[in-house]
Amino acid sequence: MSMDPERRRSPRIAVAVDGLNGVVKGAVPVALHDISAGGLRLGLRSSLEPGGVYPLTALLRGLSLTTPIRVTRCSRGGPAWEAGAEFLWRDDADAAAVRRWLRSRATGAF
């Protein structure tokens, strides 16, 4: 077990999901694994190009999210792929909604 300090700018919140809860590129189903104010980690059946910018639509309990993302990494993990991405907010209100949703999860107020 690594004891390295957390390097992320924003703490992550695990997303409890059974199955797929989002779509990238308008047609590629994804499963969000965790999310932070700055980005997310997702699983998918095909690769995404690191550096690529794609539209994301996701439905989480209490949050509907539609925003472009930039893929920062993508690697194969067994039969599936895992990608990390950063949000490219077009609207400050969307970013604020995600921060509120994350706070409600962190405090258990959901």
Image: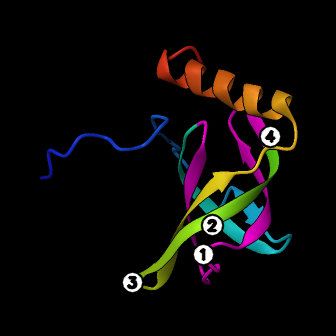
* Mark 2 touches mark 1? (CB < 8 Å): yes
Q: Tell me the SS state at disc 1.
A: loop
> Mark 3 or 2, which is nearer the eye?
2
Earlier residue among tags 3 and 2:
2
Left or right of residue 31: residue 95? right
Residue 3 in sight in this render: yes
Earlier residue among tags 2 and 1:
1
**Colour treatment of the image:** rainbow
Position of residue 28 measured from the top left corner of the image (x, y, whole percent)? 75, 75
Spatial CA span between label 4 and label 1: 25 Å
The quadrant where residue 64 appears: top right
Disc 3: which residue: 78
Position of residue 54 measured from the top left corner of the image (x, y, whole percent)? 78, 67
Position of residue 84 measured from the top left corner of the image (x, y, whole percent)? 54, 62
* Residue 95 belongs to the span the image colors magenta: no
Q: Tell me the SS state at disc 4.
A: strand
The magenta segment: 37-64
Spatial CA span between label 3 and label 2: 20 Å
Earlier residue among tags 3 and 4:
4
Circle on res. 71: 2
Spatial CA span between label 3 and label 1: 19 Å
Earlier residue among tags 3 and 1:
1
Disc 1: which residue: 50
Q: Quadrant of the C terminus?
A: top right
Q: Tell me the SS state at disc 3.
A: loop
Residue type at numbered disc 2? Val
Residue drawn where x is 19% and y is 46% of the image: 4
* Residue 53 belongs to the span the image colors magenta: yes
Spatial CA span between label 3 and label 4: 29 Å
